[in-house]
Amino acid sequence: MAAAEEKKQDSKNADKCIILIGPPGAGKGTHAPKLVETYNVPHLSTGDMLRAAVAAGTELGKKAKT
């Protein structure tokens, strides 16, 4: 994709916010990378963030663990 076209695509997706909600095993982690690739949006996993905070022993991690 040409740089100008890619920039145009990025600006079209700048206002996109896709939130995947579902129980464990519903496919959120399976579909998220596909959405990242298709729509060029970042993937933020709050579950991964909380697990990392717990593992690091941060204040938030301590609260999440209890």
Image (cartoon, rainbow, N blue to C red):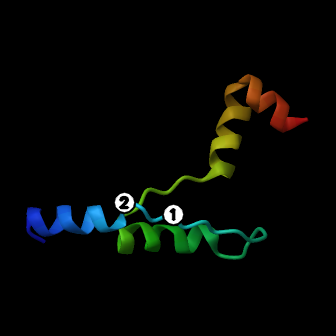
Residue 7: quarter of image:
bottom left
Residue 56 % position (x, y) = 67, 27
* Location of mark 2 (residue): 14
Q: Which residue occupies 74% across, 34% down?
A: 54
Query: Which is nearer the eye, 40 or 30?
Result: 40
Q: Which residue occupies 63% across, 69% down?
A: 20
Left or right side of 14 for 47:
right
Left or right side of 32 for 10:
left
Name the amino acid type tagged 1: Cys
Residue 29 % position (x, y) = 59, 67
Name the amino acid type tagged 2: Ala
Query: What number is the disc on residue 17?
Result: 1
Kindly indicate whether the residue at mark 1 contacts the one at mark 2 (C-beta within 8 angstroms).
no
Residue 32 % position (x, y) = 52, 68
Q: Residues within 10 Å of mark 2 (few under 14, many from 20)?
A: few
Query: Which is nearer the eye, 30 or 60?
Result: 60
Q: Under tag 2, what secondary structure? A: loop
Q: Residues within 10 Å of mark 1 (few under 14, many from 20)?
A: few
Residue 24: quarter of image:
bottom right
Q: Which residue occupies 74% across, 71% down?
A: 22
Left or right side of 2 for 41:
right
Q: Under tag 1, what secondary structure? A: loop
Q: Which residue occupies 84% across, 31% down?
A: 63
Residue 12: quarter of image:
bottom left
Query: Which is nearer the eye, 63 or 30?
Result: 63
Question: Residue reaching furthest right?
Answer: 66
Q: CA distance from mark 2 to mark 1?
A: 9 Å
